[in-house]
Image (spheres, grey):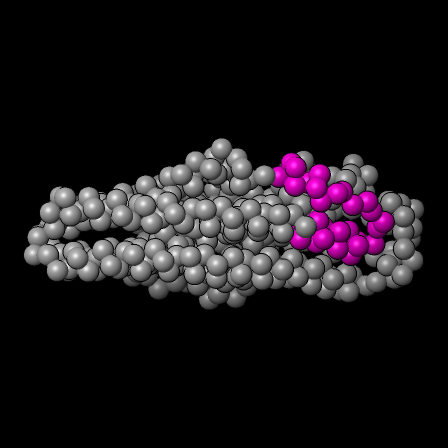
Amino acid sequence: MFPRSNERRLSASQRAELVRRSEARFRQALATEAIDAAERLQRAYRGVLKATDTRLKEVKGDRLLTPAGTQRLVDGIRAELDGLTAEIEAQARRLQDGAIKTGLAMGAEALDTAGVLFGRPAVESVQALVNYVDSSAFQQRLQQYGDTYANEVADTILAMAAQGKDPAKIARAVTRLMRGQPLNDAQRMVRTVQLYAARRGQQAIFQKNSDVVLGWVWSSARDKRTCFGCLAKHGSKHPITEVLNDHHLGRCAMVPMTPSWADLGFEDGTDLPVIETGEAWFRAQPEAEQRQQMGPALWMAYRDGAFTFDQLAQPYQNDVYGEMIGEASLTELIGEAAAREYVRQARTATVVSRPTISTPSQPAYVTVKVQ
């Protein structure tokens, strides 16, 4: 690691702002690419909806939806959705390759912010290692895409027919299903590939510079859309052998940990800012915001010490990405009976502020040391 005199003179607040802007640019770059993919998927999906609407008009005109008619409808929807998988794969592959380049660029920017000289791995070498789209699990998910929603349509028809609903109402229910879930799932598939590929790009540049990158710190967006699984992981330290593994459509980023200037023998340098833990950040928010973000029942249970903040990060397994992190439910945290009681209290009780909610029981900041 070689110091840059101009970088050492930056103040802590200036470095903090550089890190914040770098994270914002990373998220914005990915979002811009994803918007284009979403629009392309929407255009392709309009053909599916048009064909489905044509078939549903026949259903609305029948007084009784026969088994043969149901089968024709379901088979037709399956065929239309199967035809969409080529576009899903194409967009996933395009976003994957673009995200690797974005991840490499933003990983380099993060190291530049730290004020170090670094090497860059070749894009092609990373692309050869990162290939979610061609994995057997992703390809299997593509092959199951048409069946998944065709079966949902069949289940919807059978359930409503058993309740005596008329064909017109059944057709409307199928329309609602088709206008939401299949397209949302397609976009979720391609965007998650993009996000994970971008992080693998970041990880590759950190690993390329393992002599100056000690690891990375989990950084969440910390806004109203941030789930508590991600917030619980915010500020946690990880080795460069790990890749950030939040949930589908997650927006978290990896911030590199580098040796301090003092560790390198320089007395006048200012290091990257220490990242506050998610719990410390949450406890610093006004009580009303804490309740709104967490929800009354979950907040009351946390206030009472029924669970610890780190337990909000709930791991789960995915066949494409391996272990991912989501938000634990109140039932998962404290059990069904206790959860029901807190829900009941939240509906009826007047909440009394308790000082313990604003006093961290654990260190509020993560410190970076050279081992």
**Residue under the image location 54 percent in, 57 percent down:** 34
Q: Is residue 150 above or below residue 136?
A: below
**Residue under the image location 45 percent in, 46 percent down:** 86
User: Residue 212 is drawn in which quadrant?
Assistant: top right
Would residue 284 be found to the left or right of residue 367 on screen?
A: left
Would residue 238 be found to the left or right of residue 319 on screen?
A: right
Q: Nearer the viewer, residue 39 or 368?
A: 39
Tell me, yes or no, whether the highlighted magenta stretch contains residue 104: yes
User: Residue 345 is drawn in which quadrant?
Assistant: bottom left
- How many numbered dots are placed on residues in this image? 0
Q: Nearer the viewer, residue 41 or 115?
A: 41
Q: Position of residue 222 (x, y in %)?
A: 56, 59
Would residue 62 be found to the left or right of residue 23 on screen?
A: left
Q: Position of residue 2 (x, y in %)?
A: 90, 48
Q: Nearer the viewer, residue 88 or 311?
A: 88
Magenta segment's dominant SS is helix
Tell me, yes or no, whether the highlighted magenta stretch contains residue 355: no
Range covered by the magenta-colored residues: 102-130
Q: Is residue 159 above or below residue 13?
A: above
Q: Position of residue 301 (x, y in %)?
A: 41, 51
**Residue under the image location 35 percent in, 44 percent down:** 146
